[in-house]
């Protein structure tokens, strides 16, 4: 499932983040790339320990904890501390698939990357190119969202970022280990949850929604790993 999540950050939060990102020291993005993707990766990144990365990362994580759409779609067990990248002057990232397991730097923790997320800090009118292209069984999807919005997609997907030929594309990217490893099962639970919300708001008799909520939780109990 490829799902845009609007307004993860408020306009004020985006402004604060951009101020910090403009003043930060960026390094070559190949620092976090695996062997294969280092060959096609051409961008800049913030060092993980940079104060800007930590402050904005904490802002994103606390926003996600309160985002009902994100929680329903991702069913998160663990979220990787957000990383930050910038593309400009023709920079791009060729087709690759993200590493399945990521070590959280400075901790003994590892995350299985079930979902990938990109949160945009610059708007579509501020740069040319820079689309995130995600391949799935229905073809290739072209993603370019307003600042503060985020795209969530299965980390199993091949994807690339098209060259940025004008302006700069600044974004955060990170991964989520879901309680539901399988994208198909997770999508079923999300669809069921959306249908239950609609029943709750459109139907006065609560009994069918209660019954389906029972089904939702029993499927979650059957499939979840925590
Ligand atoms: Ni990637």
Image (tube, grey):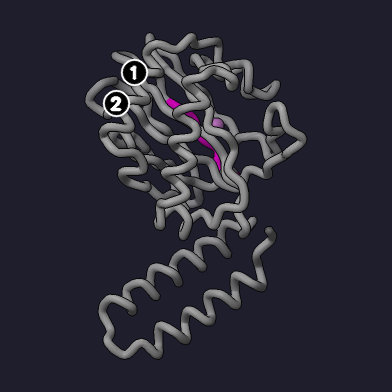
Q: Which mark is residue 19?
A: 1
Give the answer, above or below, for where 82 lies relative to 90. below
Question: What residue is rendered at 61% in x and 59% in y?
Answer: 180
Please check the rendered image and state whether residue 117 is part of the magenta-colored stretch, yes or no: no
How far apart, in angstroms, are the residues tagged by discs 2 and 1?
6 Å
**Label 1 Cα neighbours within 10 Å, binned few <14 / some 14-19 / many ≥20:** few
Up/down of 50 relative to 99, above or below = above
Q: Extreme right residue here?
A: 108
Circle number at residue 15: 2
- Queried on whether the Cβ of the residue with tag 2 lies below 8 angstroms from ligand 1, the answer reads no
Q: Nearer the viewer, residue 88 or 216?
A: 216
Question: Could you tell me residue 135's position as x and y percent?
Answer: 49, 42
Task: Name above or below for residue 69 compared with residue 116.
Answer: below
Looking at the image, residue 146 sits to the left or right of residue 49; the answer is left
> Percent from the top left, x then y, of residue 127?
28, 20
- In the depicted structure, whether residue 24 falls above or below residue 157: above
Q: Which residues are magenta?
A: 156-161
Instruction: Tell me whether circle 2 and circle 1 mark residues in contact (CB < 8 Å).
Output: yes
Give the residue displayed 33% in from the left and 23% down from the top. Answer: 129
Q: Residue at x 71, y 27 (%)?
A: 106
Residue nearest the observer in this picture, 106 or 215 = 106
State the SS at label 1.
helix
- Report whether 101 appears left or right of 194: right
Q: Quadrant of ligand 1?
A: top right
Q: Which of the numbered marks, if any, corresponds to residue 164?
A: none
Disc 1 Cβ-to-ligand 1 distance below 8 Å: no
Identify the image quadrant of the C terminus. bottom right
Nearest the viewer among 116 and 135 is: 116
Q: Quadrant of residue 206?
A: bottom left
């Amino acid at each position: 499932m490829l799902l845009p999540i609007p307004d993860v950050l408020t306009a004020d939060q985006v402004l604060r983040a951009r101020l910090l990102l403009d003043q930060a020291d960026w390094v070559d993005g190949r620092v976090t790339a695996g062997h294969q993707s280092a060959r096609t990766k051409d961008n800049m990144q913030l060092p993980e320990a940079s104060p800007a990365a930590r402050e904005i990362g904490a802002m994103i994580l606390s926003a996600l904890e309160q985002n009902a759409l994100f929680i329903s779609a991702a069913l998160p067990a663990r979220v990787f501390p957000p990383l930050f990248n910038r593309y400009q002057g023709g920079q791009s990232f060729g087709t690759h698939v993200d590493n399945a397991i990521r070590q959280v730097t400075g901790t003994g923790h590892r995350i299985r990357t079930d979902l990938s997320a990109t949160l945009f800090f610059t708007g579509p009118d501020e740069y040319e190119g820079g689309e995130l292209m995600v391949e799935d069984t229905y073809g290739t999807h072209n993603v370019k969202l307003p600042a503060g919005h985020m795209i969530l997609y299965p980390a199993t997907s091949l994807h690339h970022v098209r060259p940025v030929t004008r302006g700069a594309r600044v974004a955060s990217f990170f991964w989520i280990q879901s309680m539901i490893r399988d994208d198909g099962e997770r999508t079923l639970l999300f669809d069921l949850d959306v249908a239950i919300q609609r029943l709750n708001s459109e139907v006065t008799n609560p009994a069918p929604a209660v019954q389906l909520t029972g089904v939702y939780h029993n499927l979650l109990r059957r499939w979840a790993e925590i």
